[in-house]
Structure formats: C-alpha cells, structure tokens
Image: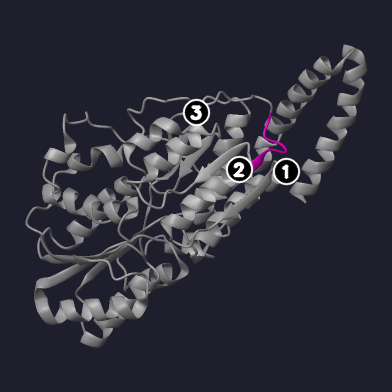
Amino acid sequence: MKKTFSLLFVLVLALAFTGAVFANGGSEGSAESADSGNLEASLALDSAVAALTAADGQPLIKVSGTSRVVPARPADPEALSEDDPLHWWDMEFAGENSVKKNIPESPKDGAIGKKVIMIVHGDHPWTTACINGATKVADVYDMDFKALSPNWDLAVQNQMIDQAINEHPDLLLLIPLDAKTAPQQARKINQAGVPLIMFNTLPEAAAMDYCIAWTGPDDFGQFRKLSHLWADKLGKTGGVAYVQHAPGGSPYFARYWGPRSELAVYAPDIKVLDAQAPGFEADKTQQLVSDWLTRFGDELTGICAADDSAQALGITEALKKAGREDVVVIAAGNSKQGMDLVKEGKLFAITYQTAEGDGALAVKTAADWFNGVDLPPVRNLPQHMITADDVEDFYPPQW
C-alpha cells in the first residue's frame, strides 16, 4: 500500500512538472522544477518511513539519542596491551576523527527513484531480516533497490563491488566483510565516484575517510555494557570463556575484546580461561563447551557467545548434558532462539540487535543524503540489554 501510494504521488507530481516546463520556457527550468518537486515529495515521505515498524512491533527506524563519551585517542593505540580498552580506539570509534576525502556532494534532489545497491556479508537469517528492513524503507521512497550477498567470501564480495560500480548506482551500501581490507574497498568505490555508506560491521578507521557515513550498532559499547551485567552476576570473580564470532569482521573484536578489555578494568579478578571461534553450527559449539567443562570443571563459571542462536543452543545443550546450571551465559542477540533461552533462564542476558532496523537505518541515511540532510559521520542504533524482565517486549522475533 505504501509503495502504491508513493508511486501515485510521484505520478501526480510528474503531471505538475509538465506544467512547469511551459511556465519556465525550456528544459533547464524543467529540470530544476523536477528536482525541486522530487525533493519535496521525498521529504514528505519521511513521516511514512518514521511510522514503519519491524516484525517485533518496535519502531523500524531507531537512532541512538545519546552518544557515548569518546575518550581522547592515544598516540599509538596498538602499542597498548590488548586488555586495555584504548587499544581498540581506532576500531571502536572509527569515524570520530575521519578526514573525508573526495566525498561527493549531495545532489539534494530527493530520494524517490534513486538506484541503490546493498552488498551484505553473507547468508544468514539475520541478513534476511536486515534486507527485509532495508526493503521496507526503499519501497516507501520507490527506490530501484537490490541486495547482493557474497556468502561470507571476501573475494566474491570484491567481485560484487566491481559489479556494482559498473552498474553506476546512485549510492552503494556495504557491510564490510573484513575490517582490515575495508579501507581498500572504500577507496576503490570512492575513486569510481560512487557515493558510499558502510553499515553494520565496523571497518578500520581509514575506511571512514572514503564514505559518507557509517550506520549500525555500537557493538563495542553494547558489549562493554553487557559485560558489567555479567560481571555483577558473577560477583566479579570466577573463570570465563568466549565463543567468538568469525575472525576478521568487527564483531569478532567487539564481542570478545570489548568485554574482555572492559572486565580487565571493571572486574580484574575474573580470569579468562579460553576463547575460540567454532563457527555457527550448534554441534561444533556444543563439542567445544563440553571440552571446556572437562578441562576446567567448576572453574568455568561464565560463557560469552557472539551469537544467541546456533552458538547459544550448542552451549545450553552442553551445559544440560553436564548437569551444570551454575554457568552464567550471555550473548549477542536477539534471535527467536536466544529470546526463548532468556525466557527459559538458560541465557542470562542478550543484546538488542535489531536486524531489520540495521538495514532500514542504512537506507534511511542514504535517503537523507539524497535529500540534502547534514549527516554525522556515525549513526548508531540504540543500546539495550534484554533480560527475563523485558524479553516479552521483543516478540514476535525478527528472525
């Protein structure tokens, strides 16, 4: 219905533009009038976008109202210990000190009808929900929108970037698959003259120089906050282990080094026993945790998982078979599996990780750029920790 309305609205405006052609006496006046009319029509659709909801009933477009305090950048963050939170400054606060290079100016001619290509990181139920959210916003603005997935293959993602450049889109949206190679990807897109917005996973800071903006979750901030809840539940003592994300992308760093470096300051008596990345298959995670339970016994009192679906299922099954109900488990969220486990008391807390909202915010930011809105270098989704106290508020799940 929203897409039909926007199409009819644009058609009415087009008829108005025809009159403007004759009134202005030439094609130049016609083009200026058309641009102005498209901008006005696009801005008028902002309220329809703001009214959209995600599958869980939450507002689709959510932007963090308050930013975390950004500490001063150390002279050489990498010279600091990895257990020092400031070691991760260039990734955690990527974009805060970016120097924009060759960034195209906004055409300020409206978002309606623009060609936008989104390249994600890989196939996953989360990604499906993310694209669904992006499509909801693109449909309202009647964008020529498509999404491409390299299925976790960096070489394929690079090929897709080349393909997208050759299609001359009005803007490219990119989830960088690998933080360290993202600057090369961003520079290539920038040099081709294609406007770029990165989202969801953080690149190395240098990539931010070549993109209009970055949008997505404050993954480091969320896990720093989550680690405080975890540490308090553990009494700031005990031994913990980390089931990590796929190496390379920013979630690998944010969901391991974020909490680990935070606990080194907030709860230094908590001991890190092990950290491994078994992938996203429940049986492999179950085997890993079973091995930990054998190796560490009662010394293992907490587990942090990068994923609240397959990894969380593997963790809880291993704990169930071992008869261990004392291990405090936290995870990134918020899938149906994860929220069900929170309800059942098997997960202590998870992050609110709106998949639909992530994709939607990226497309809305693109629309804002087309509409001439001044954009900050970073637009974060709000932080929230889901526990048994409020998990019901996030049903039905997005994925």
x, y percent for residue 120? 50, 53
The range drawn in magenta is 110-116
| Residue at the image position 37 percent from the left and 66 percent from the top | 308
Q: Measure the alpha-carbon separation of dots 1 and 2.
A: 22 Å
State the SS at label 3. Answer: loop
Q: Does residue 396 appear left or right of residue 347 in this picture?
A: right
Disc 1 marks which amino acid? Asp
**Type of amino acid under label 3:** Leu
Residue under label 1 = 142
Sequence order check: which comes first, mark 1 or mark 2? 1
The residue identified by callout 3 is 375
- Crowd band around label 1 with a 10 angstrom C-alpha radius: few (<14), some (14–19), many (20+): many
Q: Position of residue 185 (x, y in %)?
A: 43, 42
Residue at position x 36%, y 46% in the image: 181
Specify whether residue 115 is painted magenta. yes
Q: Residue at x 54, y 26 (%)?
A: 104
Q: Is residue 14 above or below residue 335?
A: above
For the point 37% across and 61% down, the residue is: 389
Instruction: Name which quarter of the figure residue 302 lies in.
Output: bottom left
In percent of width and height, residue 243 lies at 26, 66
The numbered mark, 3 or 2, whose residue comes first in the sequence reads 2
What secondary structure do most residues of the magenta stretch adopt?
Answer: loop
Q: Earlier in the sequence, mark 1 or mark 3?
A: 1
Q: Are marks 1 and 2 in contact (CB under 8 Å)?
A: no
- CB-based contact (under 8 Å), mark 3 and mark 2: no
Secondary element type, mark 2: helix
Q: In terms of image quadrants, where is residue 100?
A: top left
Q: Is residue 4 left or right of residue 266?
A: right
Which marked residue is nearer to the observer: mark 3 or mark 2? 2
Tag shown at residue 166: 2
Q: Secondary structure at mark 1?
A: loop
Asked whether residue 313 is in view, the answer is yes
